[in-house]
Amino acid sequence: MADPRRDDPLLDPPPIPWAAVIFLVGMGALAGASIGYMAAGSGGALALGVLGAAGVGGYVLARLLAPWWRARRIRRAHRRRQAHPSRSEVGHGGRP
Amino acid sequence: MADVRDPLMHPPRMPWGTLLFLGLDAAVLAGVGAAALFGRPAWALPAAAAAFALVTGYLAFRILAPWMEVHAAFLVGDLERRLAPPREVAIRPERPEPTRILNGTVRVGEADAVEPDGDRPIRELLVGLIRAAQVNGWGIRDLVGLRIQTSAGEIPITDPLWRAATDLLAERGFLRKTPAGSVPLQDPEVLVAWARSGQLGPEIRRRLGPYLRASSPSPIPVEAVLQLIVIYFTHLG
């Protein structure tokens, strides 16, 4: 069931599909470890496995969260501008 | 109860069974292929694991990536919509404006808005006539001098126009014509509802159309321009 509290996509972070993310991280680790083992033995498997897991996980999470961070930053800047308008944006305010 | 998910807000479900099947399929092919091609059975397991991980990871990402794009586009659109300046005044009157008679002109209000079809001016004319008669009386003496604002211009209520309109309404059983004036046989709201959106028919267009055409002013007064040219040349000569 959709979360009824999640009503503002600009304030709440997007829903993270954790099952898919963990699966992708595992697959990144497995692919890295397999290729590393074939290329350089156990040391290579460990190094490329960790690298694969971290790279895939970081990339997927960044792809999910970066647009929300950007939108949130723009919105906050807009609200700040509205609260404290610069001199050029202020009208004459009744002055002759 | 079915799980209702907004595709813009919630990530898609993963077909885990299909993913694992395709991954295992790729793993078997890669394991057998690696052992047969390179002649090293020890590479079969790592090759199978790599193929499983790469295929399932690729497929899962192919499912997830479009949703990430859609969600990002939705966020940008939502942000633009919220930051955009208001385009029109959102405050509207609580009740639609009724038809009014102001300075002798009947103005058909929003409450009596007619179908915006090809007969719109005729409908406005009929609504204006019915409302004017409802207020002032159903005889021509009660209505003469009034004008009706239509989308084709202001139409003065004249004796021939009133005669034509009442003939048409009488033919449809809406009123009865007597020497003393017309007597409505149905509630004026029924007449107005018919005039607003009912079937008018060619007879009404044929009889009321000329009054609308006569009222719309010619865009170029040709005779006046010709007369001015003649006067100009006569004086020069």
Image (cartoon, rainbow, N blue to C red):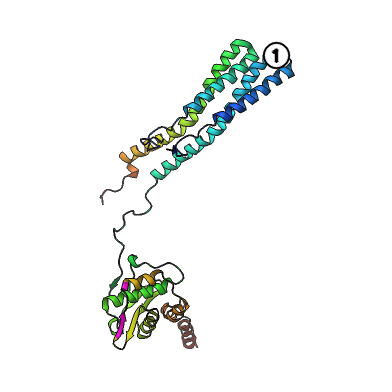
Q: Residue B132: x, y in percent?
A: 30, 76
Q: Is residue B65 left or right of residue B110?
A: right
On screen, residue A54 versus residue A96, left or right, reads right
Residue visible at 71% across and 17% down? B35
Residue B30: which quarter of the image? Answer: top right
Q: Examine the image and state in which quarter residue B165 appears.
A: bottom left
Q: Is residue A47 magenta?
A: no
Write the start and end of the magenta stretch as one range.
B181-188
Instruction: Name which quarter of the figure residue B37 lies in.
Output: top right
Q: Quadrant of the N terminus of chain B?
A: top left
User: Measured along the vertical axis of the image, is residue A28 above or below residue B86?
Assistant: above
Q: At x 60% / y 10%, what residue is drawn?
A: A42
Q: Secondary structure at mark 1?
A: helix
Residue B123, percent from left and from top: 40, 72
Residue B21 or residue B70, whichever sits in front: B21
Residue pictured at 39% horizontal, 74% vertical: B153
Task: Give the residue type that dot 1 points to.
Answer: Pro
Q: Where's residue B187, x and y in %?
A: 31, 73
Is there any visible trace of residue B55 in the rendered image? no
Camera-side residue of B99 and B202: B202
